[in-house]
Amino acid sequence: MNAIEISHLSKRYGSSVAVDDLSLQIPSGTVFGLLGPNGSGKTTTFKCMLGLMRSNAGSVEYAGQPLAPASFEDIAYVPERSVLYDWMTVAQHVEMNRRAFARFDPSLAEQLLTRFSIDPRKRVRALSKGMRTAVMVSLAFARNAKVLILDEPTSGLDPVNQRHVLGLIVNEAARGNTVLFSSHQIGQVERAADRIAVLERGRSILTGQVDDLKADRKIVEGVFLDGTTDITAVSTDPRVARVDRTERIVRLLVTSGADDMAQRMTAAGATGVRVLDLNLEDIFFYAVSPADATSDSASRSIAS
Amino acid sequence: MPAVLTVDPGSGVPIYLQIIEQVKRSVALGVLQSGEQLPTVKQLALDLTINPNTVARAYRDLERDQVIETAPGRGSFVRQNGVEANVRAAATDVARGAVDGALREAKSLGLTRADVRATVDLALDRWFPEER
Protein backbone atom coordinates (compact mmCIF):
# COMPACT_ATOMS: atom_id res chain seq x y z
CA MET A 1 0.00 0.00 0.00
CA ASN A 2 1.35 3.38 -0.98
CA ALA A 3 0.92 6.09 1.63
CA ILE A 4 1.52 8.64 -1.10
CA GLU A 5 1.24 8.24 -4.84
CA ILE A 6 2.21 11.09 -7.13
CA SER A 7 1.19 10.55 -10.75
CA HIS A 8 2.35 12.65 -13.69
CA LEU A 9 2.50 15.84 -11.63
CA SER A 10 3.43 18.98 -13.57
CA LYS A 11 3.73 22.60 -12.51
CA ARG A 12 4.79 25.53 -14.67
CA TYR A 13 5.55 29.08 -13.63
CA GLY A 14 4.92 31.02 -16.81
CA SER A 15 7.23 29.45 -19.34
CA SER A 16 9.51 27.71 -16.84
CA VAL A 17 8.74 24.17 -15.80
CA ALA A 18 9.21 23.52 -12.06
CA VAL A 19 7.79 19.99 -11.89
CA ASP A 20 7.78 17.94 -15.07
CA ASP A 21 5.58 14.85 -15.29
CA LEU A 22 6.74 13.60 -11.90
CA SER A 23 5.57 10.22 -10.62
CA LEU A 24 6.63 8.80 -7.24
CA GLN A 25 5.32 5.94 -5.13
CA ILE A 26 5.96 6.21 -1.41
CA PRO A 27 5.09 2.96 0.38
CA SER A 28 3.46 3.15 3.78
CA GLY A 29 5.95 3.04 6.65
CA THR A 30 8.92 4.24 4.64
CA VAL A 31 11.15 7.22 5.16
CA PHE A 32 11.51 8.70 1.71
CA GLY A 33 14.31 11.19 1.08
CA LEU A 34 13.96 13.70 -1.73
CA LEU A 35 17.30 14.92 -3.02
CA GLY A 36 18.03 17.46 -5.70
CA PRO A 37 19.99 20.58 -6.48
CA ASN A 38 18.51 23.98 -5.68
CA GLY A 39 15.60 24.73 -7.96
CA SER A 40 15.02 21.09 -8.88
CA GLY A 41 11.36 21.26 -7.84
CA LYS A 42 11.31 19.75 -4.34
CA THR A 43 9.44 22.57 -2.60
CA THR A 44 7.04 23.06 -5.50
CA THR A 45 6.27 19.33 -5.40
CA PHE A 46 5.49 19.52 -1.68
CA LYS A 47 3.24 22.56 -2.18
CA CYS A 48 1.33 20.87 -5.00
CA MET A 49 0.98 17.73 -2.87
CA LEU A 50 -0.59 19.73 -0.07
CA GLY A 51 -2.91 21.82 -2.22
CA LEU A 52 -0.97 24.96 -1.32
CA MET A 53 -0.35 25.44 -5.02
CA ARG A 54 -2.42 24.33 -7.98
CA SER A 55 -0.66 21.91 -10.32
CA ASN A 56 -1.09 22.09 -14.08
CA ALA A 57 -1.49 18.35 -14.46
CA GLY A 58 -1.32 15.11 -12.57
CA SER A 59 -2.66 13.81 -9.29
CA VAL A 60 -1.59 13.07 -5.72
CA GLU A 61 -3.27 10.40 -3.61
CA TYR A 62 -2.88 9.56 0.05
CA ALA A 63 -3.66 5.92 0.84
CA GLY A 64 -5.53 5.78 -2.45
CA GLN A 65 -7.61 8.92 -1.82
CA PRO A 66 -7.20 12.44 -3.17
CA LEU A 67 -6.42 15.16 -0.64
CA ALA A 68 -9.59 16.11 1.22
CA PRO A 69 -10.32 18.09 4.40
CA ALA A 70 -10.80 14.77 6.24
CA SER A 71 -7.18 13.77 5.49
CA PHE A 72 -5.68 17.00 6.87
CA GLU A 73 -5.60 15.41 10.34
CA ASP A 74 -3.36 12.66 9.00
CA ILE A 75 -0.81 14.88 7.28
CA ALA A 76 1.69 17.14 9.03
CA TYR A 77 3.87 19.54 7.05
CA VAL A 78 7.00 21.48 7.90
CA PRO A 79 7.53 24.15 5.23
CA GLU A 80 10.93 25.31 4.10
CA ARG A 81 10.30 28.87 5.31
CA SER A 82 8.87 29.85 8.66
CA VAL A 83 5.10 30.16 8.75
CA LEU A 84 5.13 31.10 12.44
CA TYR A 85 3.71 34.44 13.56
CA ASP A 86 6.47 36.78 14.75
CA TRP A 87 4.28 38.49 17.30
CA MET A 88 3.03 35.29 18.97
CA THR A 89 4.86 33.27 21.62
CA VAL A 90 5.81 29.66 21.06
CA ALA A 91 3.27 28.60 23.71
CA GLN A 92 0.55 30.44 21.78
CA HIS A 93 1.47 28.44 18.68
CA VAL A 94 1.13 25.25 20.71
CA GLU A 95 -2.32 26.37 21.82
CA MET A 96 -3.28 27.32 18.27
CA ASN A 97 -2.33 23.84 17.04
CA ARG A 98 -4.22 22.20 19.91
CA ARG A 99 -7.36 23.99 18.79
CA ALA A 100 -6.81 23.24 15.11
CA PHE A 101 -5.94 19.53 15.22
CA ALA A 102 -7.86 16.86 17.10
CA ARG A 103 -4.90 14.53 17.71
CA PHE A 104 -2.39 17.26 18.59
CA ASP A 105 -0.62 16.41 21.86
CA PRO A 106 0.37 19.64 23.70
CA SER A 107 2.46 17.86 26.34
CA LEU A 108 4.43 16.06 23.62
CA ALA A 109 4.96 19.42 21.89
CA GLU A 110 6.34 20.84 25.15
CA GLN A 111 8.67 17.84 25.60
CA LEU A 112 9.98 18.27 22.09
CA LEU A 113 10.51 22.00 22.55
CA THR A 114 12.43 21.30 25.76
CA ARG A 115 14.60 18.83 23.88
CA PHE A 116 15.47 21.61 21.44
CA SER A 117 16.09 23.96 24.43
CA ILE A 118 13.34 26.33 23.37
CA ASP A 119 11.60 28.45 25.98
CA PRO A 120 7.87 28.42 25.05
CA ARG A 121 7.40 31.86 26.61
CA LYS A 122 9.55 33.45 23.92
CA ARG A 123 8.04 35.29 21.02
CA VAL A 124 8.90 33.89 17.59
CA ARG A 125 10.45 37.27 16.73
CA ALA A 126 13.22 36.50 19.25
CA LEU A 127 14.09 33.09 17.75
CA SER A 128 16.91 32.35 15.33
CA LYS A 129 16.22 30.65 11.98
CA GLY A 130 17.25 27.27 13.36
CA MET A 131 15.07 27.67 16.45
CA ARG A 132 12.08 28.49 14.24
CA THR A 133 12.72 25.30 12.32
CA ALA A 134 12.83 23.42 15.64
CA VAL A 135 9.49 24.96 16.69
CA MET A 136 7.83 23.91 13.42
CA VAL A 137 9.31 20.42 13.74
CA SER A 138 8.06 20.12 17.34
CA LEU A 139 4.55 21.20 16.33
CA ALA A 140 4.48 18.78 13.40
CA PHE A 141 5.68 15.75 15.38
CA ALA A 142 3.14 16.47 18.13
CA ARG A 143 0.33 16.14 15.59
CA ASN A 144 0.21 12.32 15.76
CA ALA A 145 -0.07 12.38 11.99
CA LYS A 146 0.29 9.32 9.78
CA VAL A 147 2.17 11.14 7.06
CA LEU A 148 4.85 13.76 7.66
CA ILE A 149 6.07 15.96 4.83
CA LEU A 150 9.19 17.82 5.88
CA ASP A 151 10.84 20.41 3.64
CA GLU A 152 14.42 20.84 4.91
CA PRO A 153 13.53 19.95 8.53
CA THR A 154 17.09 20.41 9.78
CA SER A 155 17.98 23.70 8.12
CA GLY A 156 19.71 26.12 10.44
CA LEU A 157 19.99 23.54 13.24
CA ASP A 158 23.24 22.63 14.99
CA PRO A 159 24.50 19.04 14.58
CA VAL A 160 23.06 17.86 17.92
CA ASN A 161 19.61 19.20 17.10
CA GLN A 162 19.86 17.83 13.56
CA ARG A 163 20.38 14.43 15.13
CA HIS A 164 17.31 14.98 17.33
CA VAL A 165 15.22 15.58 14.20
CA LEU A 166 16.59 12.42 12.57
CA GLY A 167 15.73 10.50 15.74
CA LEU A 168 12.16 11.79 15.53
CA ILE A 169 11.93 10.71 11.89
CA VAL A 170 13.26 7.22 12.73
CA ASN A 171 10.78 6.98 15.60
CA GLU A 172 7.85 7.80 13.28
CA ALA A 173 8.93 5.09 10.86
CA ALA A 174 9.26 2.60 13.73
CA ARG A 175 5.63 3.37 14.57
CA GLY A 176 4.60 2.56 11.02
CA ASN A 177 4.10 6.15 9.89
CA THR A 178 5.39 7.56 6.62
CA VAL A 179 7.88 10.40 6.29
CA LEU A 180 8.75 12.28 3.12
CA PHE A 181 11.56 14.75 3.61
CA SER A 182 14.01 16.81 1.62
CA SER A 183 17.50 17.74 2.68
CA HIS A 184 20.71 18.99 1.16
CA GLN A 185 22.59 17.07 3.86
CA ILE A 186 22.94 13.78 2.06
CA GLY A 187 24.44 12.11 5.12
CA GLN A 188 21.16 12.63 6.95
CA VAL A 189 19.13 11.14 4.14
CA GLU A 190 21.56 8.22 4.05
CA ARG A 191 20.88 7.53 7.74
CA ALA A 192 17.18 8.03 8.06
CA ALA A 193 15.76 7.18 4.64
CA ASP A 194 15.25 3.72 3.23
CA ARG A 195 14.18 5.08 -0.16
CA ILE A 196 15.18 8.11 -2.16
CA ALA A 197 14.46 9.96 -5.35
CA VAL A 198 16.78 12.44 -6.99
CA LEU A 199 15.02 15.33 -8.70
CA GLU A 200 16.55 17.37 -11.45
CA ARG A 201 14.67 20.03 -13.38
CA GLY A 202 11.42 18.74 -11.96
CA ARG A 203 11.96 15.15 -13.03
CA SER A 204 12.91 12.07 -11.05
CA ILE A 205 16.23 10.95 -12.52
CA LEU A 206 16.96 8.21 -9.97
CA THR A 207 14.85 6.41 -7.39
CA GLY A 208 15.16 3.27 -5.32
CA GLN A 209 16.08 1.77 -1.98
CA VAL A 210 19.25 3.36 -0.62
CA ASP A 211 20.83 0.00 0.27
CA ASP A 212 19.99 -1.47 -3.15
CA LEU A 213 21.48 1.53 -4.94
CA LYS A 214 24.66 1.08 -2.89
CA ALA A 215 24.75 -2.65 -3.53
CA ASP A 216 24.26 -2.25 -7.30
CA ARG A 217 26.06 0.94 -8.24
CA LYS A 218 29.82 0.60 -8.26
CA ILE A 219 32.82 2.05 -9.94
CA VAL A 220 34.84 -0.53 -11.86
CA GLU A 221 38.32 0.80 -12.38
CA GLY A 222 41.10 -0.64 -14.47
CA VAL A 223 44.50 0.35 -15.76
CA PHE A 224 45.25 0.15 -19.46
CA LEU A 225 48.95 0.88 -19.89
CA ASP A 226 48.53 0.84 -23.65
CA GLY A 227 46.36 3.90 -24.18
CA THR A 228 45.14 2.65 -27.52
CA THR A 229 43.26 -0.39 -26.22
CA ASP A 230 39.77 -0.53 -27.64
CA ILE A 231 37.36 -1.03 -24.73
CA THR A 232 34.18 -0.31 -26.66
CA ALA A 233 32.96 -3.87 -26.08
CA VAL A 234 33.07 -3.26 -22.32
CA SER A 235 32.09 0.40 -22.18
CA THR A 236 28.97 0.00 -24.32
CA ASP A 237 27.48 -2.65 -22.02
CA PRO A 238 23.97 -1.51 -21.00
CA ARG A 239 24.98 -1.71 -17.34
CA VAL A 240 27.58 1.02 -17.85
CA ALA A 241 26.03 4.39 -17.01
CA ARG A 242 29.13 6.45 -17.48
CA VAL A 243 32.70 6.20 -18.70
CA ASP A 244 35.53 8.32 -17.37
CA ARG A 245 38.87 7.81 -19.02
CA THR A 246 42.19 9.42 -18.34
CA GLU A 247 45.51 8.56 -19.99
CA ARG A 248 45.80 5.10 -18.45
CA ILE A 249 42.87 4.66 -16.11
CA VAL A 250 39.32 3.76 -17.10
CA ARG A 251 36.52 4.14 -14.62
CA LEU A 252 33.08 2.74 -15.39
CA LEU A 253 30.02 3.59 -13.36
CA VAL A 254 27.97 0.40 -13.47
CA THR A 255 24.36 0.12 -12.35
CA SER A 256 24.63 -3.63 -11.63
CA GLY A 257 26.86 -6.65 -12.18
CA ALA A 258 30.07 -5.03 -10.92
CA ASP A 259 31.90 -8.34 -10.41
CA ASP A 260 31.06 -9.49 -13.92
CA MET A 261 32.11 -6.14 -15.38
CA ALA A 262 35.39 -6.34 -13.45
CA GLN A 263 36.11 -9.71 -15.03
CA ARG A 264 35.29 -8.38 -18.48
CA MET A 265 37.57 -5.42 -17.88
CA THR A 266 40.39 -7.84 -16.99
CA ALA A 267 39.61 -9.91 -20.09
CA ALA A 268 39.87 -6.73 -22.17
CA GLY A 269 43.45 -6.35 -20.97
CA ALA A 270 43.16 -4.18 -17.87
CA THR A 271 45.39 -4.64 -14.84
CA GLY A 272 44.78 -3.48 -11.28
CA VAL A 273 41.03 -3.86 -11.69
CA ARG A 274 39.17 -2.66 -8.63
CA VAL A 275 35.53 -2.38 -7.66
CA LEU A 276 34.86 0.74 -5.60
CA ASP A 277 31.84 1.26 -3.37
CA LEU A 278 29.80 4.43 -3.72
CA ASN A 279 28.08 6.18 -0.85
CA LEU A 280 24.89 8.13 -1.38
CA GLU A 281 26.72 11.37 -1.96
CA ASP A 282 28.75 9.76 -4.76
CA ILE A 283 25.61 8.22 -6.24
CA PHE A 284 23.82 11.58 -6.11
CA PHE A 285 26.80 13.39 -7.59
CA TYR A 286 27.10 11.00 -10.52
CA ALA A 287 23.35 11.19 -11.12
CA VAL A 288 23.27 14.98 -11.44
CA SER A 289 26.59 15.59 -13.20
CA PRO A 290 27.10 14.84 -16.86
CA ALA A 291 30.21 12.76 -17.53
CA ASP A 292 32.17 15.44 -19.38
CA ALA A 293 31.65 17.95 -16.55
CA THR A 294 33.60 15.84 -14.09
CA SER A 295 36.20 14.11 -16.18
CA ASP A 296 39.12 15.86 -17.77
CA SER A 297 39.08 13.62 -20.77
CA ALA A 298 35.89 11.63 -20.88
CA SER A 299 35.01 13.08 -24.23
CA ARG A 300 38.31 11.95 -25.66
CA SER A 301 37.80 9.13 -28.08
CA ILE A 302 38.34 5.79 -26.39
CA ALA A 303 40.40 4.46 -29.27
CA SER A 304 42.35 7.61 -30.09
CA MET B 1 22.23 -3.40 25.91
CA PRO B 2 25.42 -1.50 25.14
CA ALA B 3 26.04 -0.85 21.50
CA VAL B 4 27.34 -4.21 20.30
CA LEU B 5 26.64 -3.01 16.80
CA THR B 6 27.84 0.08 15.03
CA VAL B 7 27.31 1.11 11.45
CA ASP B 8 28.83 3.68 9.16
CA PRO B 9 25.86 5.04 7.19
CA GLY B 10 28.20 7.14 5.03
CA SER B 11 30.04 4.13 3.65
CA GLY B 12 29.28 2.59 0.27
CA VAL B 13 28.45 -0.73 1.91
CA PRO B 14 24.67 -1.13 2.37
CA ILE B 15 23.72 -0.60 6.01
CA TYR B 16 21.77 -3.88 6.20
CA LEU B 17 24.87 -5.78 5.04
CA GLN B 18 26.96 -4.01 7.70
CA ILE B 19 24.51 -5.18 10.38
CA ILE B 20 24.47 -8.76 9.06
CA GLU B 21 28.26 -8.90 8.93
CA GLN B 22 28.59 -7.54 12.45
CA VAL B 23 26.06 -9.88 13.99
CA LYS B 24 27.76 -12.86 12.32
CA ARG B 25 31.14 -11.65 13.46
CA SER B 26 29.83 -11.10 17.01
CA VAL B 27 28.38 -14.62 17.07
CA ALA B 28 31.62 -16.07 15.72
CA LEU B 29 33.63 -14.24 18.37
CA GLY B 30 31.22 -15.10 21.15
CA VAL B 31 30.39 -11.46 21.79
CA LEU B 32 26.83 -12.56 21.14
CA GLN B 33 26.12 -15.94 22.70
CA SER B 34 23.44 -18.48 21.96
CA GLY B 35 20.09 -17.50 23.36
CA GLU B 36 21.18 -13.93 23.84
CA GLN B 37 18.64 -11.28 22.91
CA LEU B 38 19.33 -8.73 20.23
CA PRO B 39 17.95 -5.22 20.49
CA THR B 40 14.51 -4.91 18.91
CA VAL B 41 14.32 -3.44 15.43
CA LYS B 42 12.96 -0.20 16.86
CA GLN B 43 15.59 -0.01 19.60
CA LEU B 44 18.50 -0.60 17.25
CA ALA B 45 17.10 1.91 14.74
CA LEU B 46 16.78 4.54 17.47
CA ASP B 47 20.17 3.71 19.05
CA LEU B 48 22.01 4.04 15.74
CA THR B 49 19.63 6.66 14.22
CA ILE B 50 19.08 4.56 11.13
CA ASN B 51 16.00 3.48 9.23
CA PRO B 52 13.98 0.74 10.99
CA ASN B 53 13.05 -0.95 7.70
CA THR B 54 16.75 -1.34 7.01
CA VAL B 55 17.27 -2.99 10.41
CA ALA B 56 14.26 -5.25 9.81
CA ARG B 57 15.73 -6.30 6.46
CA ALA B 58 19.00 -7.29 8.16
CA TYR B 59 17.15 -9.28 10.82
CA ARG B 60 15.08 -11.09 8.17
CA ASP B 61 18.25 -12.16 6.36
CA LEU B 62 19.85 -13.26 9.65
CA GLU B 63 16.78 -15.39 10.34
CA ARG B 64 16.96 -16.89 6.85
CA ASP B 65 20.63 -17.71 7.49
CA GLN B 66 19.54 -19.29 10.80
CA VAL B 67 21.79 -17.07 12.87
CA ILE B 68 18.93 -15.60 14.88
CA GLU B 69 15.32 -16.47 15.52
CA THR B 70 12.46 -14.12 16.26
CA ALA B 71 9.68 -14.93 18.68
CA PRO B 72 6.71 -12.70 17.91
CA GLY B 73 6.21 -10.25 20.73
CA ARG B 74 9.37 -11.33 22.55
CA GLY B 75 12.16 -10.21 20.27
CA SER B 76 15.08 -11.67 18.36
CA PHE B 77 17.58 -14.12 19.85
CA VAL B 78 20.79 -15.79 18.78
CA ARG B 79 19.75 -19.31 17.86
CA GLN B 80 20.23 -22.04 20.43
CA ASN B 81 20.18 -25.05 18.15
CA GLY B 82 23.27 -25.92 16.21
CA VAL B 83 25.25 -23.05 17.66
CA GLU B 84 28.49 -24.83 16.80
CA ALA B 85 27.54 -25.00 13.14
CA ASN B 86 26.27 -21.42 13.19
CA VAL B 87 29.43 -20.07 14.70
CA ARG B 88 31.47 -21.92 12.14
CA ALA B 89 29.25 -20.80 9.28
CA ALA B 90 29.36 -17.22 10.53
CA ALA B 91 33.14 -17.30 10.83
CA THR B 92 33.45 -18.89 7.39
CA ASP B 93 31.23 -16.18 5.91
CA VAL B 94 33.39 -13.42 7.34
CA ALA B 95 36.62 -15.11 6.25
CA ARG B 96 35.30 -15.85 2.77
CA GLY B 97 34.61 -12.18 2.17
CA ALA B 98 38.13 -11.20 3.19
CA VAL B 99 39.79 -13.97 1.14
CA ASP B 100 37.66 -13.10 -1.89
CA GLY B 101 38.76 -9.50 -1.78
CA ALA B 102 42.41 -10.46 -1.43
CA LEU B 103 42.28 -12.91 -4.35
CA ARG B 104 40.50 -10.43 -6.57
CA GLU B 105 43.23 -7.91 -5.84
CA ALA B 106 45.95 -10.49 -6.52
CA LYS B 107 44.39 -11.45 -9.83
CA SER B 108 43.96 -7.86 -10.92
CA LEU B 109 47.64 -7.25 -10.21
CA GLY B 110 48.47 -9.98 -12.71
CA LEU B 111 49.53 -12.77 -10.34
CA THR B 112 49.01 -16.33 -11.55
CA ARG B 113 47.18 -19.09 -9.72
CA ALA B 114 50.55 -20.61 -8.76
CA ASP B 115 51.80 -17.25 -7.40
CA VAL B 116 48.68 -16.88 -5.29
CA ARG B 117 48.87 -20.46 -4.03
CA ALA B 118 52.45 -19.91 -2.88
CA THR B 119 51.41 -16.71 -1.11
CA VAL B 120 48.46 -18.41 0.57
CA ASP B 121 50.68 -21.34 1.66
CA LEU B 122 53.10 -18.93 3.28
CA ALA B 123 50.26 -17.18 5.09
CA LEU B 124 48.81 -20.50 6.22
CA ASP B 125 52.19 -21.55 7.63
CA ARG B 126 52.41 -18.27 9.48
CA TRP B 127 48.90 -18.30 10.96
CA PHE B 128 48.35 -22.04 11.44
CA PRO B 129 51.86 -23.33 12.30
CA GLU B 130 50.45 -26.06 14.57
CA GLU B 131 48.58 -27.72 11.68
CA ARG B 132 51.52 -27.94 9.28
Image (cartoon, coloured by chain):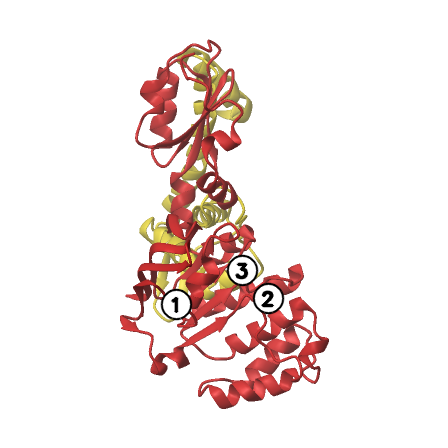
Chain colours: A red, B yellow
B78, above or below B85, in the image: below
For label 2, the residue is A164
* Mark drawn on residue A109: none
For label 3, the crowd category at 10 Å Cα-Cα, with few meaning under 14, some 14 to 19 and many 20 or more, is: many
Few, some or many C-alpha atoms within 10 Å of disc 2 (few <14, some 14-19, many ≥20)?
Answer: some
- Residue A178 image point, x, y percent: 40, 67
Q: Please report, as a chain letter, where disc 2 is located.
A: A
At numbered mark 1, what does the secondary structure look like: helix, strand or loop? helix
- Which chain does tag 3 point to? B
Q: Chain of mark 1?
A: A
Residue shown at 49% from the left, 47% from the top:
B22
- Count the marks: 3
Q: Which residue was labeled with disc 3?
A: B49
CB atoms at circles 1 and 2 under 8 Å apart? no
Q: What amino acid does circle 1 point to? A: Met
Q: Measure how far apart labels 3 and 1 are at the Cα level.
A: 28 Å
For badge 2, the amino acid type reads His
Q: Horizontal and vertical percent for residue A207?
A: 37, 50
Of residue B61 and residue A198, the one placed in the foreground of this image is A198
Between the C-alphas of marks 1 and 2, the distance is 26 Å
Q: Residue at x 62, y 87 (%)?
A: A92
Q: Is residue B79 visible?
A: no
Which quarter of the figure has residue B69? bottom left
Name the image quarter holding the N terminus of chain A: bottom left
Q: Are marks 3 and 2 on the same chain?
A: no
Are the residues flagged by discs 1 and 2 from a single subunit? yes
**On the same chain: label 3 and label 1?**
no
Q: Amino acid at mark 3?
A: Thr
Q: Earlier in the sequence, mark 1 or mark 2?
A: 1
- Reading the image, the residue beneath label 1 is A49
